[in-house]
Amino acid sequence: MKLTSTAMRIERIPAPEGTAFRLVGELSDDDCPQLRRMLAGPVSDTNVTTLDLSALEACGTAGIALLVDLTARADRAEGYLVLRSVSDTVFRSFAMSDAVSKLHIIREPATGAFSSAPRYLFRIGETTPFAYASSRHDFTRFGEEHVWAHQSHDWLIEAVSGTVLAHRTRTTYFSAETGASLYSEHPTSATEP
């Protein structure tokens, strides 16, 4: 399925999980209503909606505001809107608009293809992920560009200091000091271990 406008094209693409679209061209103010209509349903589902931005050349202020709004809408619906393969130019636009921390951005080479489904980390009791691993073992917090922690033999180790953060048992990460559950690879309620 392809929808076209003068500046941008929206393509539905296959994804390993949820629904995915690729934005091609420039996301101008005139394209925002069309993009909102396309994504309003998917981001309201409790699922992953991925936007591949590898072919997006520019994004105006209205487009950035729309992406922030759609991300917040997905969070409220306990779904996820993930932006993948963001070019340096578009990332700088997000940064200049102070939007990086409000978006779920996965920085990876702009290949135009999914390498694999990312793994997410959730704080216990939260339904919105705070970190992701697009490679197998390196976790980056949303809104940041650098690796935050590395998983090695079921230990989660802080990347810069080398401090042991947690030990993994199945999909839950427990504090190395207290044994309290800190993170999970799935959303959890506050009452779950």
Image (cartoon, rainbow, N blue to C red):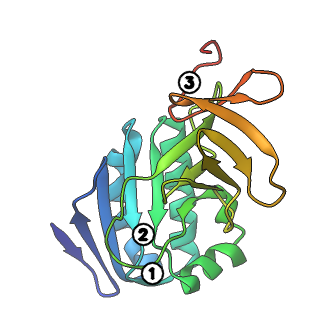
Decide: marks 2, 1 in contact (CB < 8 A)? yes
* Mark 1 secondary-structure assignment: loop
Q: Which of the 4 quarters of the picture holds residue 84?
A: bottom left
- Ranked by sequence position, the earlier of labels 3 and 2 is 2
Q: Are marks 3 and 1 in contact (CB under 8 Å)?
A: no
Badge number at residue 188: 3
Q: Quadrant of residue 24?
A: bottom left
Q: How far across and how far down the image is residue 57, in percent?
A: 45, 87
Local secondary structure at mark 2: helix
How many residues crowd mark 2 within 10 Å: few (<14), some (14–19), many (20+)? some
Q: Nearer the viewer, residue 140 or 176?
A: 176
Query: Mark 1 highlights which residue?
Result: 28
Instruction: Look at label 2 and name its amino acid.
Output: Cys
User: Tags 3 and 2 in contact by the CB under 8 Å rule?
Assistant: no
Q: Is residue 143 above or below residue 123?
A: below
User: Which dot, 3 or 1, sits closer to the camera?
Assistant: 3
Q: Is residue 102 left or right of residue 178?
A: left
Q: Residue at x 59, y 42 (%)?
A: 153
Q: Is residue 157 above or below residue 183?
A: below
Lateral position of residue 165 relative to residue 184, left or right: right
The mark that comes first in sequence, 3 or 1, is 1
What residue lies at 33% left-to-right and 47% top-to-bottom? 42
> Which amino acid, by three-letter code, is at mark 1?
Ser
- Number of other residues with Cα within 10 Å of mark 1, as a class: few under 14, some 14 to 19, many 20 or more: some
Distance between the Cα atoms at labels 3 and 2? 33 Å
Residue 32, disc: 2
Q: Residue furthest left?
A: 1
Q: Residue furthest top?
A: 191
